[in-house]
Amino acid sequence: MEWLRMQQWSPYAVGIGIGVLSWVTFVLSDKPIGCSTAFARFSGMIERVFRGDKTLTKPYFKQYAPALTWDVMLVIGIVIGSFASALLSGQFQLTWVPQLWAATFGAAYVPRLLAAVIGGVFLGAGARWANGCTSGHGISGTLQLAMSSWIAALCFFAGGIVTAFLIFRVFGA
Amino acid sequence: MLTKLHSNQRLQLVLGLVVGIAFGFLLQKGGVTSYDVILGQLLLTDFTVVKVMLSAVITGMIGVYALRSLGLARLHPKSGSIGSTVVGGLLFGVGFAVLGYCPGTISGAIGQGSLDALIGGTVGILLGSWLFATFSPKLQKPVLDKGDFGPVTLPEVLKVNPWAVVIPAAGLLTALLFALERFGW
């Protein structure tokens, strides 16, 4: 079982594995893999703690109930699976600032956390706005040849590439 | 189709968890739960993310369309519009680069101990999703419904047998991966 302890697998092996996993979810669960709906449900669960059942009257939460559903379990599973993989390979490590960020903007954690919060707001709103993320549109939707998903995936990368170049090649240069 | 299994809600929750564990394991082994790898992709210096995604799409596409032909699966293409897909997609892209993770890979990043993902990114995503959930009724008519094209697939748009798109698409995407390797990415 040495391969389970490897630090990194070939990206093609990983991609084929994810592709096979999509066959499994289509057959056993009649669902494509997607991750961003769960975050909207989590946000509804948090709102419900403060506002009670009034949260459930929001049209969005009527459509996507803030409850423990298949997609919420999926996201919880990702945390566990990644933790197991990192533990087996000895890569589990608490870190505040990623290397590339530290090399450009310094190792202080406040600027990095601020950027992560701001980026997260755009990412979370954008995913729900576009009705899917890199997994729901980028992998599951494109493999179904859905028109919305191919357009979304191109926009994810177009927006991402331009912004990354602005951050690292213009501001960080 | 396994409709009895699909309607067993408790079992589905377990399946969701098991699939998630496998997905998270694969994402971490692929290296794509790391900020440096994702930013490397967006800065076009490291093509790991594209390699993982495209090989997943090729494998998934052939398998899911075959399972559909066998009557074991049905498609769930998402609806789209210019106001929703393009505007939302570009907003997502900005967030993708600023945060350095996406909703799936951030969950994996949390699992491997990245605290910027757990404490910064997750708070942001929850806030962003909540803002959209709260204000989406106001955006519906003026933005989200603009340029609606519905839940169509490319074979439907081209009015051809799905395999007439699946096979060339698989060939084209495989060629793209070979080209990436050939040119040293």
Image (cartoon, coloured by chain):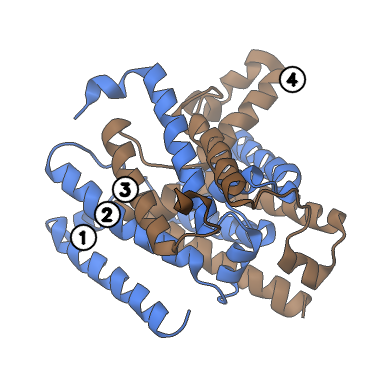
Chain colours: A brown, B blue
Q: Work out how far the residue at label 3 is from the one at label 1, CA to CA, in angstroms.
A: 16 Å
Q: Are marks 1 and 2 on the same chain?
A: yes
Name the secondary structure under disc 2.
Answer: helix
Decide: few, some or many residues near mark 3? Use Cα within 10 Å; few <14, some 14-19, many ≥20. Answer: some
Residue receiving disc 3: A20
Name the secondary structure under disc 3.
Answer: helix
Residue at the spot 18% in from the left edge and 36% down from the top edge: B72
Task: Kindly identify which numbered label has been placed on residue B61.
Answer: 2
N-terminal-most mark, 1 or 2: 2
Q: Position of residue A71 (x, y in %)?
A: 47, 33
B18 or A142: which is nearer to us? B18
The quadrant of the image that shows the N terminus of chain B is top left
Decide: few, some or many residues near mark 1? Use Cα within 10 Å; few <14, some 14-19, many ≥20. Answer: many
B105 or B95: which is nearer to us? B105
Decide: few, some or many residues near mark 4? Use Cα within 10 Å; few <14, some 14-19, many ≥20. Answer: few
Residue at the spot 25% in from the left edge and 66% down from the top edge: B169
Q: In which quadrant of the rendered view does residue B22 lie? A: top left
Residue receiving disc 1: B166
Residue receiving disc 4: A50
- The answer to the question of whether label 1 and label 2 lie on touching residues, with beta carbons closer than 8 A, is yes
Amino acid beneath label 4? Phe
Outermost top residue? A53
Q: Work out how far the residue at label 1 is from the one at label 2, CA to CA, in angstroms.
A: 7 Å
